[in-house]
Image: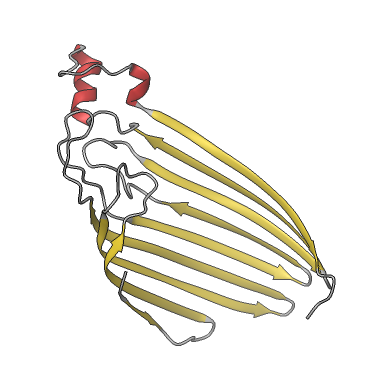
């Protein structure tokens, strides 16, 4: 989408930035049937600091984004919802990196909050994760190890919160039948990545 971005000058290793985008195409993995949807009034912001302490270099950063959001499709959904509407963005990520000599280690943590969750259905939704990485290089040879862990908890977007509560407490299905296993889901993804590279002819 079209927008504007501003970066501050670098002062003592610190720099910040902010951007505004009136309309951004919807791409949240958690939104259902989001073809044609957009996020409105997206604001992205962040800052980073880099400093050297002898042979040690340190980097810290924080970025985030907020927005209003909706889906343009107004057809009915499974359950009681009649409007396909999603929460806007509300996410942030923190990162840190330390390097010395030929070694570098770093870590990240992110929290997407309820970004992209369908209103009235993704009650209790959350998505967060963290990662660690380490790298070593010597001349043309480099070696890197990464680990990433992600956790997602959701209502599975099958029924509204009100309908799920009614079925759980009274057994009333409010016009449809949903298996208990469909009322919630939780999963974790853990990924290890190990790689190396050798540059045969530098330059």
- In the rendered image, the vertical position of residue 42 relative to residue 175, given as above or below: below
Q: Judge from the rendering whether residue 154 lies leftward or rightward of residue 51; answer left or right.
A: left
Q: Which of 169 and 26 is in front in this view?
A: 26
- In this rendering, the answer to whether 102 lies above or below 26 is below
**Quadrant of the drawing holding the C terminus:** bottom right
Q: Position of residue 178 (x, y in %)?
A: 28, 19
- Looking at this view, is 161 or 10 the one in front? 161
Residue at 81% from the left image edge and 77% from the top image edge = 202
Which quadrant holds residue 175? Answer: top left
Q: Report the front residue among 183 and 107.
A: 183
Measuring 45% from the left and 73% from the top, which residue is drawn there? Answer: 47
In the picture, the quarter occupied by the N terminus is bottom left
- Is residue 98 left or right of 177 when viewed as pictured? right
* Residue 133 picture location, percent across and down: 66, 56
Determine which quarter of the picture holds residue 173.
top left
Residue farthest to the top? 171
């Amino acid at each position: 989408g079209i927008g504007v971005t501003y970066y501050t000058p670098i002062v003592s290793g610190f720099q910040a930035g902010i951007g505004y985008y009136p309309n951004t195409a919807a791409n949240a993995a958690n939104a259902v049937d989001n073809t044609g949807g957009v996020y409105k009034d997206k604001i992205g912001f962040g800052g980073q600091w880099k400093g050297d302490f002898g042979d040690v270099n340190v980097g810290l950063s924080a970025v985030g984004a907020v927005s209003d959001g909706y889906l343009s499709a107004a057809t009915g959904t499974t359950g009681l919802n009649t409007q396909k509407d999603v929460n806007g963005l509300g996410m942030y990520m923190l990162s840190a990196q330390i390097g010395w000599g030929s070694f570098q280690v770093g870590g990240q943590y992110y929290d997407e909050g309820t970004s992209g969750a369908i209103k009235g259905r993704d009650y209790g939704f959350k998505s967060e994760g963290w990662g660690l990485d380490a790298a070593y290089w010597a001349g043309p040879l480099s070696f890197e190890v990464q680990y990433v862990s992600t956790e997602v908890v959701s209502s599975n977007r099958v029924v509204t919160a009100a309908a799920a509560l009614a079925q759980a407490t009274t057994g009333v299905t409010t016009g449809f039948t949903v298996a208990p296993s469909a009322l919630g889901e939780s999963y974790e993804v853990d990924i290890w990545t190990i790689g190396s590279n050798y540059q045969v002819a530098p330059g």
